Image: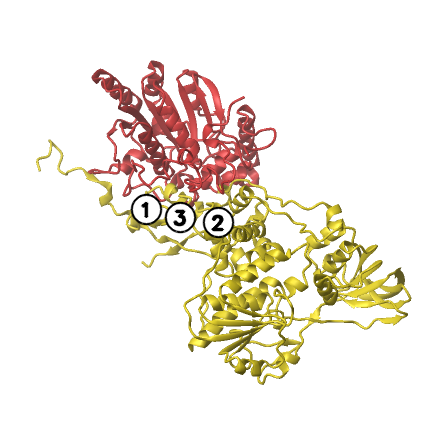
Chain colours: A yellow, B red
Amino acid sequence: MKTPFAITLDAGSSLLNKTGSWRTERPVYLDRLPPCNHACPAGENIQQWLYLTEEGRYAEAWRQIMDDNPFPAVMGRVCYHPCEVSCNRGQLDEAVGINAVERFLGDQALINEWQMEAGAPTGKRVMVVGAGPGGLAAAYHLRRMGHEVTVYDASPQAGGMVRYGIPKYRMPREKLRAEVARIEQMGADLQLNTRIDDVIAARDEGKFDAVFLSIGAQLPKRVDIKVNGELPVLDAAIVLRNTELEEPTGLRGQVVVYGGGNTAIDVARSAVRLGAKSATVVVFEAREHMPAHEFEVKEAREEGVELICLRAIREVNGNQVTLEKLVPSEGRWPQPTGQFETITADVVVQALGQNVQTDLVDTISGIKVAEGAVQVGTDMQTGCPGVFAGGDMIPSERTVTTSIGHGKKAARNIDAYLRGITYDAAEQHELVTFDMLNTWYYSDAPRTVRPMLSVMRRQSGFAEIVGNIDQDNATFEARRCMSCGNCFECDNCYGVCPDNAVNKLGPGMRFKFKYDYCKGCGLCVSECPCGAIKMTPEEI
Amino acid sequence: MPQIPESHQKVRFYQTGTLTVGNRLLDAEHRSVQGTMDRSNSLDSGHRACQGCGEALGARFAIDAAMRATNNQLIAANATGCLEVFTTPYPETAWSIPWIHSLFGNAAAVGAGIAAALKAKGREDVRVIAQGGDGGTTDIGFGCLSGMFDRNDDVLYICYNNEAYMNTGVQRSSATPGGARTATTMPVGKDPGNAFNTGKSVPLIAMAHLIPYVATASVHDLHDLEHKVTKAMGIHGARYIELFVPCPLGWGSKPSDTVKISRLAVECGLYPLIEAEHGELTGVTKIRRQVPVGEYLKLQRRFAHVLKPANAHQLEQLQAIANRNIKKFSLIDEQGGQE
C-alpha cells in the first residue's frame, strides 16, 4: 500500500494491543451464598424467588419456593424467618420483609390454584408416619420424585403441630388445608385417624420399601407442683389441641401460664380470646432471656397478657399460687432467693416444652434414642436400615421450617436409598458478608409494614391478626433485596471498565470478561453492588 | 433555588434506582447509554492508559453519550496530554470517531475552526467536541478557550480534570488543589504540598463568559454525567463541561478506587456538581451521604501528609473549602441529603 510522505505504517486499531498481558490479577464472576439462603432451615433459594418477584414473575417465584418447600402460605405466617435476621440489608436500613413476600406468593398460588406435578412413577413405595410439616414435606418431595407415598396420622386432620399447636389467629386453617390438599392432588395418600403402633409390621403389610418417621414431640414436660386443693393444672399442648378441636379447654377466670416460650404465649393469647378474665405468664427467665420471640411477646402484651419474669411456681394452695423470686446468675439458670409472693389463679397451665413419645420407636431394632430424641445419621437414616426420621423427634431446633427442611433432606436420601446410591448435597458457595457489598448503589427504601388487626378485634376472636401486603408492596419489598452474591445485571462492571473489557451478553445472560484487554484494575470488583466478582491471582 | 437535575428523578420501587449503570427494572428512557449493548465504545480496548484510569473511563462515558445525542455525527479535537498519548501511539488509535490531535494549547481553537468549516460547508448535522486535560485547558489552552467562549463558537469543550500534568510526570497545574503533593509541590516545610489560595475554577470563569451551558460532572455518577453531555449536545454555541477524573498514578491511589474516590470527592463537598446556563446556576446535584474530607483524602498518597497531626491546619483548610462549597451551592437540603 502506498503511504503518504514520511508515513511508514498504516493506521491500525488499538485492538492490536492486547493489554491483558499487563494483568497480575484477573476478575472472575462467581455466585456467592446469600445469608438468607444460608439461614433458611428449609433450604429455600430466597434470593432467586425474590429476583423473580421483582419482575412480577409470581408463578415462577412460587415454583422456585416449591422446589424446596411445599408450604409457602403456611411459611408466610408461621415461619420465624431466620432469613430476615441474617439479611444483609438489616445492616443498611432494615431487613427485607421476606416472610411477607412469601405469604403473598403462597396466597397467590391458592387464589390462582397453581399446582405442582408428580414425577414419573418409579414403582417404589414409601410409608410416612406423621402428617405434620416434616411428614407432609417428605411426602411432597417423594411424590415429585415419582415414589408412591402413604402418610399415616392418628389425628383427624393433617398438619401436626401447625394445626394442633399453632392458634388460628396466626395460622388460618383454610390456608393449611389448601396446601395439604395440593399435596394430596399430587397423589399422596393420607390415612388420618390411623395410629401406627408397630412400624415394621405396618411396613411389611403395606409392602413399603422405606419409612419416614416424623411423629413430633407431643409428651408435655411437667414439673411437680404441690397442689393443695382442687385447682386444675393443665398442659399447654393439650389445651391448644382442645382449642383446635373446639372442645372444652378448661381456660377460664384468671389463667396462669407457666413457661417462657412461644407455646406459653400462644396459650395466654388463646385464653384472652376464649374470654378468660386475665392471662398471666410466669416466666423463669429474665425478660430479655425469654425464649419466646419478641414480636409474639409484644403482641401478647398489646392484647392484655401480663408477664411476671424471674419467678418459679413453688406450690398451689386453693386458688393461691406461690411464686419464688429468682435472681439472674452467671450460669444458665436464675437462682432462688428464698423470697415468696402469691397470685390468684383459677387454672394453671404448664407450658414447659414437650418430649418425644418413644414407645413407637422402642419396638424397632437398631434405632438409637439418646436424651429423649431419636438419633439419625447425616442421611437422616436411623440405625434401622430403610427407616428415616426427622422433625421434632430428632435433635433439632423444633420449628415448623426445620421440620420441612428435614422432610426435604429425608426425601432426597430416601430417593437415593431406593435407587441404591448415595445422595451428595451440592457444595455450598462462599457466604456473602456485608463488607463484600457496595451498598452505595442501593436506593434508600424503608421496609413495608404489614397491617395489623386492631387490639380490640384480636381480644375477641381467632381472626388472623397479621394482614396481607398487596401486590405493589410485595414487589416493592422484593425489590429491596440486594441480591447478595448473585449478579442481577445492573451493568456496573460493563459500565465502569476503563478498558471496555467486559462483554454484555444480553438480558439473563450476564457478562463475560475480555481477558485480552482486561488490565486487572479491579474497578469492576469494587463497584459491583452485590459482591458477585472477585480478583484471583494470575499464574505467571 | 437550583433544581435537582432530571437524571436524579427518584424512581420508586426499584432496587437500585438510577444509581447503577443499568437497571433491568427501569423504563428504557431512564437507562444509561453505557448500559446498552450497542453503545459506540468511542474509546475502545487496547489503549495504553494505566490500570483504573479515570480519564479513559470519563472519555468513553462522555463521548459515547455525545455520539448517541448526535446520531453518531461527531468530530473531536484533542489537546496534547495523557488522553492523546495513551489513545494514539503511532500507528494505532483507540478512537472509533473522527479525531484530530491539535497542539497542547489550541484544542479550543482547532474545535472552533472545525465548527467554522462545517458551517461553511452547510453541515449542520455534524457536531464538534474539543477536549483536553486540566493542564491543556486551565493553563496552556486557556487563552484559546476563552476566545472560543467569547465568540460563542458551536463547540462543546470537555476538560478531563485530574488536577495536575500527569502525562509529563505529575507537575502542578492551576487545577491542583491546596495541600496536594505533585512533582513541583513537594510535601516539605511548614505548609507542605501545593499552596492554598492559588489556582482557578474554570467552570466559574466559563459562567462569567455567559455561554449557553456550563456543567461539572464526575465519573462516579454516570446518569448525571450522561444527562449533562446529552443536554449540552442539544444546545448550540460554546459549552463547557468539566469531568472529575481520578488519576491512580498521579494521586497515589489504588486503581480499583477510582470511582470510589470520585464519589467521595463529590460527597464530601470538595467537588460540587453543578449546571449553569447563560451565567446563571440552574442545577446542583445534592450530596446523598455526606462524609468528612478525610474520608476522601485518606485514599490518596498525594494527601498523606495532610492527615498527619502536624498538618492538621491543612485538613481544616480543606474541610473549610468543602463547607463553603456546600453552603454556596446548597449541596445539602435542609431535610438532609437527596433522598
Report how far apart the C-alphas of labels 2 and 1 lie in the structure: 30 Å
Q: Amino acid at mark 2?
A: Tyr
Q: Nearer the viewer, mark 3 or mark 1?
A: 1
Find the distance from the CA under tag 3 to the CA under tag 2.
36 Å
Q: Which residue is mark 1?
A: A503
Tell me which chain the residue with mark 2 is part of. Answer: A
Q: Earlier in the sequence, mark 2 or mark 1?
A: 2
Q: Is A326 drawn above or below residue A221 in the view shown?
A: above
Q: Is residue B104 left or right of residue B314?
A: left
Residues marked 3 and 2, same chain: yes
Q: Tag 2, which secondary structure? A: helix
* Residue occupied by mark 2: A58
- Label for residue A522? 3
Would you say residue A26 is visible in this rendering?
A: yes
Find numbered disc 3 in the image and state the secondary structure of the residue it sits on: loop
A417 relative position to A336: left or right: left
**Tag 1 secondary structure:** strand
Give the distance between the C-alpha atoms of the residues marked 3 and 1, in whole angstroms. 16 Å
**Position in image of residue B62 (x %, y %):** 35, 32
